Image: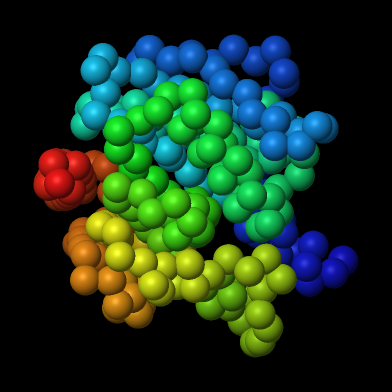
Amino acid sequence: MSLEWILKKLIFRPVKLKAEHRFRFLHEFTELTFHPHPNVALSAIHFKVDNPEGLLLYFHGNKGNLDRWGPIAAELTQFNYEVVAIDYRGYGKSTGEASAANLFTDAHYCYTKLITSLNPKKVIVYGRSLGTCVASCLAAQINPTMLILETPFYDMSDLIARYIPKVFYKSPFQLISNQHLINSKFPLLIIQGTKDRVVPFSHAKKLAESLLNPHVKFVQIDGGKHNNLSTFALYWDSLRQFIEVNGAK
């Protein structure tokens, strides 16, 4: 059992769904399928709104599939942006196998297809946990209207060292959010809870403080954990203010 195998199992925790699985969400949606390679199909959910301000592209965490993340992503339609959430390779109904390289190339592929089909006036890239690195990489490539990171990490190697002590290495998966964002200039919101035991508060704070971007806003949610930030009024107030201010520019 290699270290790389252990790391992969720690980082990627997909839950598969059968191809015939039917999603059920309270918000209006359609299913999308992307084909970044001939033998790969990526499952996605498109949550619609009337007269949208633009598109919010949502990259979820490392565990589960769209059955779990769909309702969470759908809540973001309250800001009057269409929301598209994508399952990574090997997650849900998506085929293939997740890797760092595929995360990044697939994100850009899906973005280009959505821009062509939807032609949004504005684009918000939103990442949560593992998805924050995917979102950061994509944002660095496309210069979106704004980027939102919920419970982000600075460097996956630093984060893994928390779970596998006395192992000093550089992660073969190259998930380094700081590297993607160091030269960013677009509006960036980082939200992190002080009681997060998955991605410690210090990791998100380190990321925010490492960036030269004058448009970074860091929101500290006292008592917030890794999976409950949406239960705090500050979370929603911060999102609304950030999106309204930067969407109006």
- Could you tell me residue 11's position as x and y percent? 63, 58
Left/right placement of residue 94 relative to residue 153 reads right
Rendered-image quadrant of the N terminus: bottom right
Which residue is rendered at x = 72% and y = 20% of the image?
18
Q: Which color scheme did the rendering employ for the protein?
A: rainbow
- Could you tell me residue 86's position as x and y percent? 54, 34
Would residue 202 be seen by someone viewing this image from the given angle? no
| 158 shown above or below 49 | below
Which residue is rendered at x = 70% and y = 30% of the image?
35
Residue sitting farthest toward the right: 1
| 74 shown above or below 184 | above
Left/right placement of residue 102 relative to residue 150 reads right
Left/right placement of residue 187 relative to residue 87 reads left
Left/right placement of residue 20 relative to residue 57 reads right
Which residue is rendered at x = 45% and y = 72% of the image?
178
42 vs 108, nearest the viewer: 108
Would residue 18 be seen by someone viewing this image from the given angle? yes
12 vs 82, nearest the viewer: 82
- Could you tell me residue 210's position as x and y percent? 35, 79
